[in-house]
Amino acid sequence: MTDKELAREIRKQRRLEKLGTNSPICGTCGEADYRTLEKHHVAGRKYDPDTVIACRNCHRKVSDDQKDHPAIDANADAMLSAIGMFLLGLVDLLELVIDKLSAFGLALIERAKLAGGEHAGETVA
């Protein structure tokens, strides 16, 4: 193994360790390149330590969406506020998943049309 390959492998292993898995994947878009993956605080770092793995693109989108979440009243119940922020964070993630599912569904229907044209006249047994 060359010095360059060794350095790359060390970087990779450090990144995988930080992500907490040897097979990380973005939970919203399916990106699996470890170099593009990060941990995202679902409720926001101030409200809850729980994270999910997201690629940099999805992470930027949901982090920006968090800026539109309501401010927490200092006198409000901290646990209820944290749960509310977590739920809003999940909504942000699920909106990305819904967009991806919609794109997949439309692509599948389009592919079915094309495949149907190739098999015109065949009957299904």
Image (spheres, rainbow, N blue to C red):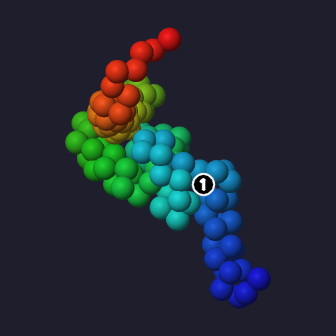
Can residue 76 be seen by looking at this rendering?
Answer: no
Quadrant where the N terminus is found in the figure:
bottom right
Question: Which quadrant would residue 94 be assigned to in this image?
Answer: top left
Look at 68% across and 73% down and name the residue there: 9
Can residue 5 be seen by looking at this rendering?
Answer: yes
Q: Please, is residue 6 above or below residue 50 in the view?
A: below
Look at 38% across and 28% down and name the residue there: 119
Residue at mark 1: 19
Residue lying farthest to the bottom in this orientation: 3
Q: Residues within 10 Å of mark 1 (few under 14, many from 20)?
A: many
Look at 31% across and 31% down and name the residue there: 117
Residue 37 position, x and y percent, is: 50, 57
Q: Amino acid at mark 1?
A: Leu
Q: Please, is residue 5 above or below residue 123 in the view?
A: below
Residue 42 position, x and y percent, is: 44, 40
With 35 as the anchor, is 71 left or right in this view?
left
Residue lying farthest to the right in this orientation: 1
Numbered disc total: 1
Residue 74 position, x and y percent, is: 32, 37
Q: Please, is residue 37 above or below residue 73 in the view?
A: below
With 46 as the anchor, is 1 left or right in this view?
right
Along the line of sight, which residue is nearer the eye, 50 or 32?
32
SS for tag 1? Answer: helix
Question: Which quadrant would residue 82 be assigned to in this image?
Answer: top left
Along the line of sight, which residue is nearer the eye, 121 or 18?
121
Along the line of sight, which residue is nearer the eye, 106 or 61?
106
Residue 73 position, x and y percent, is: 28, 34
